Every structure is written in structure tokens, then in C-alpha cells.
Image: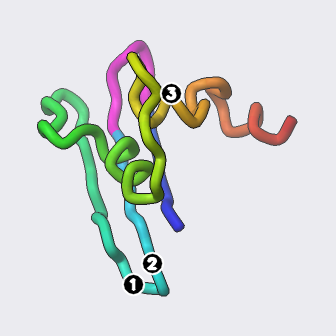
Amino acid sequence: MARVEAEFFGGVGEQWATVWEGGAVVLGPLHAPEGEPLPAEGSPISRALRRLGVIAAAGEDEFATVGLGRCRDTEDWLD
């Protein structure tokens, strides 16, 4: 199970991610603060998705591959 969060406005923001397996944290908590470069291994969300087995499509990262960018607000996921 993963918990991921992104808070962006105008292209600037932060990401958080944690992954659990069997009730134990196996990745994170990870945080990419605003204004800091992303680590070479990728954003917290992409790293969490990779841990869950997501393989990025050609030319995309894991975030885009699973369609997380299609809804910009929490309310949009309810549809």
C-alpha cells in the first residue's frame, strides 16, 4: 500500500510518499520540498509507484503512466 501526496500551484510544489508492505514501512517517508531539486532516483511518487511494480511507459514517468495527472482536484476523483 502506498500513500502519495502532491501539492502544486503554478508548477511549483512538493511531493510526499510512503509505502507499506505487510504492515511495515518499506519505503519512506519521502519528501521533495518546494524549490529543491529531485534526487537522481526520481520523485517520491515515482519511487513509490516503482516499489508497487509500475513500469513507466516510454517517454513518461510512473505518475503519468498510471494516469495520476488526469484529475487535478480531489473532488475530480469522485466522478
Q: Callout 2, which amino acid?
A: Glu
Closer to the chain start, of discs 3 and 2, is 2
Q: Residue at x 49, y 59 (%)?
A: 3
Q: Callout 1, which amino acid?
A: Ala
Instruction: Give residue 35's position: percent from left, percent from top.
Output: 18, 27
12 relative to 30, above or below:
above
Residue at the far right in the pictured view:
79
Residue at the far bottom in the pictured view:
23
15 relative to 8, above or below:
below
Q: Nearer the viewer, residue 28 or 66?
A: 66
Which of the image's four quarters has the C terminus?
top right
Give the extent of the magenta segment.
8-14
Residue 39, picture quadrant = top left
Query: Which residue is disc 2 drawn over?
Result: 21
Colour scheme in the image?
rainbow
Closer to the chain start, of discs 1 and 3, is 1
Query: Which residue is disc 3 drawn over?
Result: 64
> Which element is circle 2 on?
strand
Callout 2: 10 Å neighbours few (<14), some, many (20+)? few
Query: Which residue is disc 1 drawn over?
Result: 24
Is residue 19 found left or right of 42 in the rendered image?
right
